[in-house]
Image (cartoon, rainbow, N blue to C red):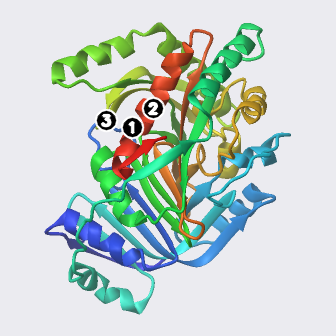
């Protein structure tokens, strides 16, 4: 293992911004920031920045077997992402739509530099001699001023009329007994966009302060993520999954926010959505865990974020000794909150109704420790950008059930997109 050094930071936020500014000169950057969210369970380090790849894994076929071997060969944590379309390797599925952003199905890397902040303490893993002076170099970097973003207009991949019609068609399939719940999404996009990804992420992160925020740069491709949701974490023998289903806006006052929270807590439709996915997650975890250990630690918890309120449940279990960490991931991927139930049937149906390739959206970004502990978010509330072809995209959606009202589903989708549009200084044509 590499040596490490720890220092106390005087101005934490300034150091974080400058460290990102320094890191952005490299081809590969991965940041995790929990924004010290006060209500998050099972949080680890507050802020982690992994920079520069000394070894890389980019996968098409046999991704999980290759990931297992790549992790086993590393003496320190590896960082990376898993795209939604890995589903095609796990089930007899396909993805026919175009993907203009272009993230690989799976990518992990062994970083040259790892910086971690817990409270006001910075730990720097010194993998190369020049990192001895790294903290001083970052601290002395001049801060770059924020500039106003250009006004953008995004086009909708699916029109409002078609989106509402599709929700109604999905409802009819639910009524016919084809499935119980389906997560239906839309894409808003723009071409020929000159974006400053780092500055945009800093603005997004400061606005959302989400507990599973991530900035990922892989060459010309960027993920700017303000996710409130964890996909799965492994702590020793414990697996933890925290699906989100149920969204409502925040109020103009604390009193109104409390009233809206109560409204969400008691909403029969939202509770039905949530419990369906909880049952699906319980089943996914049961494939990896010892009999009788899968439990719901919290059901229908409503948590307040900077932009919305969400209904979150926590499901845990004790992994069996013979189950590999990659198997635990495979048994639950893609996450039920972004598919619906039953999972294979709805993923087939999603391909029929959606007209874009999800790619990294609905996937997961995270890290894996040398002891195979891991933590991954759900890639939602995100901006995707390809600097090479100047393509910008946001993707949002929601769970459709029999009780869904198509017009309200469209409104909820726009509510989820609102914070991203604000950060981009954008509107929808």
Q: CA distance from mark 1 to mark 2?
A: 6 Å
Asked whether the residues under the numbered discs 1 and 2 touch, taking CB atoms below 8 Å apart as contact, a structural biologist would say: yes
Of the numbered discs 1 and 3, the one sitting upstream in the chain is 3
Q: Residue most toward the front?
A: 429
Q: CA distance from mark 1 to mark 3?
A: 14 Å
Residue 58 horizontal/vertical position (percent): 69, 67
Of the residues tagged 3 and 2, which is closer to the observer? Answer: 2
Badge 3 crowding class, 10 Å Cα cut-off, few under 14, some 14 to 19, many 20 or more, is some
| Label number found at residue 305 | 3
Q: Secondary structure at mark 3?
A: loop
Q: Which residue is mark 1?
A: 418
| Label number found at residue 414 | 2
Q: Is residue 286 left or right of residue 29?
A: right
Residue 389 horizontal/vertical position (percent): 60, 67
Q: Is residue 428 above or below residue 272?
A: below
Q: Secondary structure at mark 2?
A: helix
Using the image as rendered, state which of residue 289 and residue 49 is in the foreground: 49
Q: Secondary structure at mark 1?
A: helix
**What residue appears at the point 76 percent right and 10 percent down from the top-left corner?**
177
Badge 2 crowding class, 10 Å Cα cut-off, few under 14, some 14 to 19, many 20 or more, is some
Residue 22 horizontal/vertical position (percent): 35, 78
Asked whether the residues under the numbered discs 1 and 3 touch, taking CB atoms below 8 Å apart as contact, a structural biologist would say: no
**What residue appears at the point 40 percent right and 66 percent down from the top-left corner?**
196
Q: Is residue 93 left or right of residue 83?
A: right
């Amino acid at each position: 293992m590499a040596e490490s050094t720890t220092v106390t930071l005087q101005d934490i936020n300034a150091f974080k911004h400058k460290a990102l500014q320094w890191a952005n000169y490299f081809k590969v950057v991965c940041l995790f920031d929990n924004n010290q969210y006060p209500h998050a369970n099972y949080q680890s380090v507050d802020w982690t920045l992994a920079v520069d790849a000394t070894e890389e894994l980019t996968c098409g076929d046999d991704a999980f077997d290759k990931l297992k071997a790549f992790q086993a060969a590393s003496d320190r944590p590896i960082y990376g992402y898993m795209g939604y379309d890995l589903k095609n390797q796990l089930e007899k599925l396909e993805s026919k739509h175009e993907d203009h952003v272009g993230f690989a199905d799976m990518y992990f890397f062994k970083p040259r530099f790892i910086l971690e902040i817990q409270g006001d303490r910075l730990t720097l893993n010194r993998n190369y001699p020049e990192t001895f002076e790294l903290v001083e170099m970052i601290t002395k970097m001049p801060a770059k001023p924020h500039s106003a973003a250009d006004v953008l207009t995004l086009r909708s991949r699916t029109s409002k009329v078609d989106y509402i019609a599709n929700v109604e068609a999905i409802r009819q399939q639910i009524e016919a007994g084809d499935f119980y719940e389906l997560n239906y999404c839309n894409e808003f996009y723009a071409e020929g966009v000159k974006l400053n990804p780092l500055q945009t992420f800093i603005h997004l992160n400061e606005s959302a302060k989400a507990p599973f925020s991530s900035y990922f740069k892989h060459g010309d491709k960027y993920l700017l993520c303000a996710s409130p949701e964890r996909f799965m974490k492994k702590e020793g023998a414990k697996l933890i999954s925290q699906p989100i289903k149920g969204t409502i806006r925040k109020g103009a006052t604390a009193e109104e926010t409390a009233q809206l929270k109560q409204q969400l807590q008691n909403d029969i439709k939202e509770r039905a959505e949530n419990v369906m996915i909880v049952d699906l997650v319980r089943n996914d975890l049961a494939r990896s865990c010892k009999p009788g250990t899968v439990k719901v630690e919290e059901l229908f918890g409503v948590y307040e974020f900077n932009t919305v309120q969400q209904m979150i449940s926590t499901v845990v279990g004790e992994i069996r000794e013979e189950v590999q960490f990659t198997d635990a991931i495979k048994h639950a991927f893609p996450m039920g909150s972004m598919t619906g139930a039953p999972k294979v049937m709805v993923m087939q149906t999603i391909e029929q109704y959606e007209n874009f390739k999800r790619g990294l959206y609905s996937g997961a970004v995270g890290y894996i420790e040398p002891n195979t502990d891991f933590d991954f978010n759900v890639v939602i509330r995100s901006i995707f950008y390809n600097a090479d072809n100047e393509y910008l995209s946001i993707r949002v959606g929601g769970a459709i059930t029999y009780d869904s009202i198509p017009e309200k589903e469209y409104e909820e989708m726009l509510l989820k997109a609102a914070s991203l549009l604000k950060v981009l200084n954008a509107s929808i044509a």
